[in-house]
Every structure is written in structure tokens, then in C-alpha cells.
């Protein structure tokens, strides 16, 4: 990523991660097709990172996602899980109209479950403005440890 977040997609993961330590913001940028498997790996990576660094804000950027291969039912099931960092903001950046509806479904289902729902915006600039922390500078987060070993 040109903003300094770590690249994992070359090793089979479909997301990159970056962290702005000064503002305590984790960035997860989805690459390629977002599937239930990539969502599970992303959840594992976020939980592991936040357990190590402590709770913080999160931005999930779908700008470079090319497709979402997930049913509405799967999105709603995922939305029934509480956020990892209560009291911190989560923002979904979703510029594509066809993905925006899915993000809104996730947000609305979380609200209907009485859970804190993320904000859904169309640009990183809107995400930064929503957090109100000033310009964010992300440094790479190493994610090579997430790649499952190949069985020979």
C-alpha cells in the first residue's frame, strides 16, 4: 500500500493492514474479492493485533475490493457479533454503489441487534473527518504470520 500499510495479499491474504500509533487507528484495506474465508482471516488478524496493541479505532477500506462474494444472510450473521473494541469507532469506506448497500445492511443489522454500528462512508477523507483526529499516517503491520502453512 502506498500509505505505508503492510501487504499480505501476495501471500494469499486478501487484505493489507496499517496502524497509526499516534491516533490509535487500525486500517484494514480489502483487496480483490471479499469472501467468508477472507472475512474470517481479517477478523483473526484484527483480534490478534488489537489484543497485542490494545483497543482502538478501526477503518475497513473496501476501495480496492473488486467483488464481494457473500450472501446477505452471511453478512447479517456476522453483524450479530459485537465489535472487538467497544467505545471506539469503526468506519467502513465503501465507494462502490454495489458494495455500499451490503455495508449498509451490516450497519443496519447491527443497530437492529442493539449493537454499536459502524459508520459507512465513501472515501478515506470522509473516514478521517468522521474520526476527527487530524491526518492519519499508517505504518505497515506485518501479517505474514497469518498465512497458513502449506501441507506437503
Image: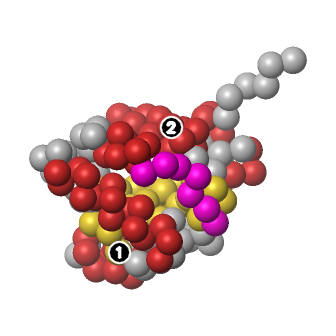
Q: Does residue 138 appear in the picture of this structure?
A: no
> Does 71 appear in magenta?
yes
**For this view, does 70 lie left or right of residue 19?**
right
Residue 130 percent location from the top left of the image: 25, 75
121, above or below 79, in the image? below
**For this view, does 136 lie left or right of residue 63?**
left
Residue 47 percent location from the top left of the image: 39, 37
Instruction: Say the numbered circle drawn on residue 121.
Output: 1
Residue projecting furthest to the left: 114
Which residue is disc 2 drawn over? Answer: 40
Label whose residue precedes the other's in the sequence (2 or 1)? 2
Q: Residues within 10 Å of mark 2 (few under 14, many from 20)?
A: few
Tell me the SS state at disc 2: helix
Q: Does residue 110 appear in the picture of this structure?
A: yes
- Give me the C-alpha separation between circle 2 and circle 1: 23 Å
Residue 78 percent location from the top left of the image: 37, 42
Q: Residue at x 28, y 80 (%)?
A: 129
The quadrant of the image that shows the N terminus is bottom right
Residue 128 lies in quadrant = bottom left
Q: Residue at x 49, y 49 (%)?
A: 71
**For this view, does 107 lie left or right of residue 11?**
left
> Does 27 appear in magenta?
no
Q: Nearer the viewer, residue 43 or 69?
A: 69
Tell me the SS state at disc 1: strand
Instruction: Say the numbered circle drawn on residue 147.
Output: none
Q: Residues within 10 Å of mark 1 (few under 14, many from 20)?
A: some
Residue projecting furthest to the top: 152
Q: Residue at x 48, y 67 (%)?
A: 99
The quadrant of the image that shows the C terminus is top right
Q: Residue at x 75, y 51 (%)?
A: 10
Q: Which residues are magenta?
A: 66-72
Amino acid at each position: 500500500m502506498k500509505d505505508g500499510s503492510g501487504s499480505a495479499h501476495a501471500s494469499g491474504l486478501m487484505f493489507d493492514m496499517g496502524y497509526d500509533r499516534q491516533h490509535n487507528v487500525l486500517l484494514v484495506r480489502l483487496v480483490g474479492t471479499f469472501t467468508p474465508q477472507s472475512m474470517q482471516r481479517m477478523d483473526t488478524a484484527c483480534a490478534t493485533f488489537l489484543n497485542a496493541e490494545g483497543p482502538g479505532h478501526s477503518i475497513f477500506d473496501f476501495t480496492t475490493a473488486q467483488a464481494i462474494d457473500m450472501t446477505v444472510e452471511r453478512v447479517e450473521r456476522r453483524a450479530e457479533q459485537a465489535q472487538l473494541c467497544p467505545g471506539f469507532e469503526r468506519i467502513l469506506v465503501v465507494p462502490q454503489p454495489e458494495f455500499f448497500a451490503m455495508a449498509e445492511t451490516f450497519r443496519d443489522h447491527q443497530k437492529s441487534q442493539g449493537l454499536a454500528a459502524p459508520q459507512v462512508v465513501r472515501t478515506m477523507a470522509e473516514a478521517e473527518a468522521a474520526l476527527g483526529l487530524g491526518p492519519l499516517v499508517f505504518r505497515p503491520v506485518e501479517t505474514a504470520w497469518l498465512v497458513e502453512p502449506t501441507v506437503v
